[in-house]
Amino acid sequence: MTTLQINDNIRNPRFYIDIVKCIQKLRSANFTEAQADVVAEIMEQQVQAIQTQQVELDALRTKEHATKGDVRESELKLQKEIEGVRKEIERVRKEIRELEIKLMALYGGGFFILLGVLAKGFHWI
């Protein structure tokens, strides 16, 4: 018995087209053998077209879900990277503050040295 199966997971879980029964019904309706064969051939072509479209649709659904998953994965990676950059920025800011303090101490010490040299040069001391 020749049977074509179409699998459509959303609307109809499974349905079968029995080509032999279809040809027998066509013959009992006074179709000639040639006419019944042509109708059966057309039905087979339609079933194959539906199966091809279903395969393409399944591929698109899978691709769409994979794309959403990929986007979510990329989003999580970017969030981690952004957090790392924020920590690095905070570390650099802390280093800058420490350098500012050191520079102020250095300038303050330099100022007192200069003041001492001037005081000695002008005989203030």
Image (tube, rainbow, N blue to C red):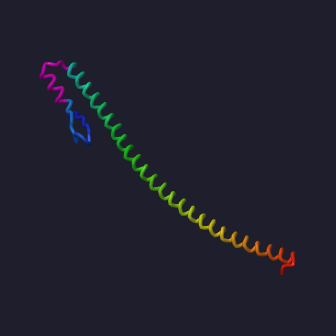
Report the side of 17 relative to 62 (left or right).
left
- Based on the picture, tell me whether residue 29 belongs to the magenta stretch: yes
Percent x, y of residue 34: 22, 19
Report the side of 108 relative to 42 (left or right).
right
Which residue appears at 35% of the width and 37% of the height? 56
Quadrant occupied by the C terminus: bottom right
Examine the residues drawn in magenta and state their main secondary structure. helix
- Based on the picture, tell me whether residue 103 belongs to the magenta stretch: no
Question: On screen, 32 above or below 120?
Answer: above
Rendered image quadrant of residue 88: bottom right
Which residue appears at 66% of the width and 71% of the height? 101
Q: Nearer the viewer, residue 32 or 76?
A: 76
Question: On screen, 95 above or below 41?
Answer: below
Furthest-left residue in view? Answer: 28
Quadrant occupied by the N terminus: top left
Question: On screen, 77 above or below 118?
Answer: above
Percent x, y of residue 123: 87, 78
Rendered image quadrant of residue 18: top left
Query: Which stretch did the figure color magenta?
Result: 20-33
